Image (cartoon, helix red, strand yellow):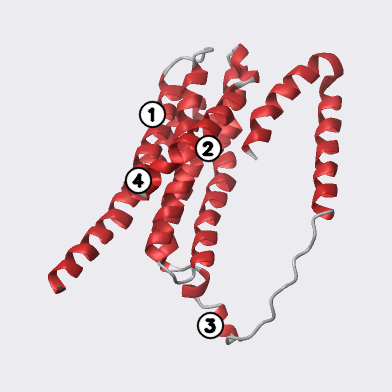
Amino acid sequence: MWGGLAIGPLVASLTVPTGGYTTVWLLVSGLGLLSAVLVSTTLAQDREPVTQTRPLRQLLGIRTLVPHAAVAPGIAFGLSSFGYGTIAAMVVLFLSDAEVAAAGYALAVFAIVFLIVRAVGSPMVDRFGGARIGQIAVAGEVIGLVALALLPPSNLSVLGVAVVGAGVALTYPATVSMTVRRAKSMNLGTSVGVMISFWDLGIMVAGPIAGLVAVLLGFPAAFLIAALLGVGSIAVIQFGVRRPESMATAAHGARE
């Protein structure tokens, strides 16, 4: 996905001068059809037989649908995803409005930095823990968003976009680690799935809200609101994940 995000803007910016926007949309549609063909040729896996059934009310219970282990990491993940959603929806418009040449490749820079940091930085989650790396990652995202909001738009604005990309890169492995640690061996698949759904919710509301704020108050205000929600994400990790874990560890030590 991120490879496509990195290459897509570059291909589009090279195609528009020679073929126009119609050619870009036809190219994108063709790639979508190619994706469908690849999916249709994937061999299906035989499903394992169902050996046990559970009552419907148990399947639809709130604890089953939204496991406790996923709530705090999921909220933190969703708040941080608002920053990515704002970048995806606003940064090209922001730079284009100021007639900055970097508008054509800002998202590509974001995706390239994202891929590099995700590959290089993910092992740090195992070494230092998801909560600590998650807070550092979101802090980087906040710094990038504040830089975009306070500094005048220029080609150097892509540095702020790059910093946001570096921060977003590690939020996923960090929150997965937090969720798995909290869930232990119970409802792991459901917990991780619910946690990821918070990311989708954050992106879903980011575009409309950031757009409305940009219309009413300007692009910088949209980036600042995303940064404030990032601060909220750091607070949720601190008080919803790290503090309960430290209290549980202290209580376990007292019992021993």
Q: Which residue is mark 2?
A: 84
Give the answer, above or below, for where 7 lies relative to 207. Answer: above
Give the alpha-carbon distance from disc 3 to disc 4, as whole Å.
37 Å
Q: Is residue 236 above or below residue 170?
A: below
Q: Check disc 3 and report its element: helix, strand or loop.
A: helix
Q: Looking at numbered disc 1 in the image, what kind of residue is underneath it?
A: Ile
Q: How much space separates mark 4 and mark 1, taking CA atoms?
A: 24 Å
Name the one closer to the observer, 113 or 240: 113
Say which element carries label 1. Answer: helix
Q: Is residue 118 visible?
A: yes
Check whether the beta carbons of the residues at disc 1 and disc 2 lie within 8 A of each other: no
Q: Which mark is residue 62?
A: none
Which tag, 4 or 2, sits closer to the chain's start?
2
Marks 2 and 3 in Cβ contact (< 8 Å): no
- Dot 4: what SS? helix
Q: In the shown orientation, is residue 164 left or right of residue 8?
A: left
Q: Nearer the viewer, mark 3 or mark 4?
A: 4
Q: Residue shown at 60%/27% (left/top)?
A: 107
Residue type at mark 4?
Arg
Expressed as whole percent of the image width and height from the top left, the position of residue 20 reads: 84, 20
Residue found 20% across the figure and 69% down from its top: 252
- Identified by mark 2, the residue type is Tyr
Regarding residue 215, the answer to whether it shows in the image is: no
Could you classify mark 3 by the number of other residues whose Cα lies within 10 Å: few (under 14), some (14-19), or many (20 or more)? few
Cβ atoms at labels 4 and 1 below 8 Å apart: no
Residue assigned mark 1: 143
Q: Quadrant for the N terminus, please.
A: top right
Query: Residue 9 location, x and y as percent?
Result: 69, 25
Residue tagged 3: 58
Q: Residue at x 57, y 24 (%)?
A: 109
Q: Earlier in the sequence, mark 1 or mark 3?
A: 3
Q: Which residue is mark 4?
A: 127
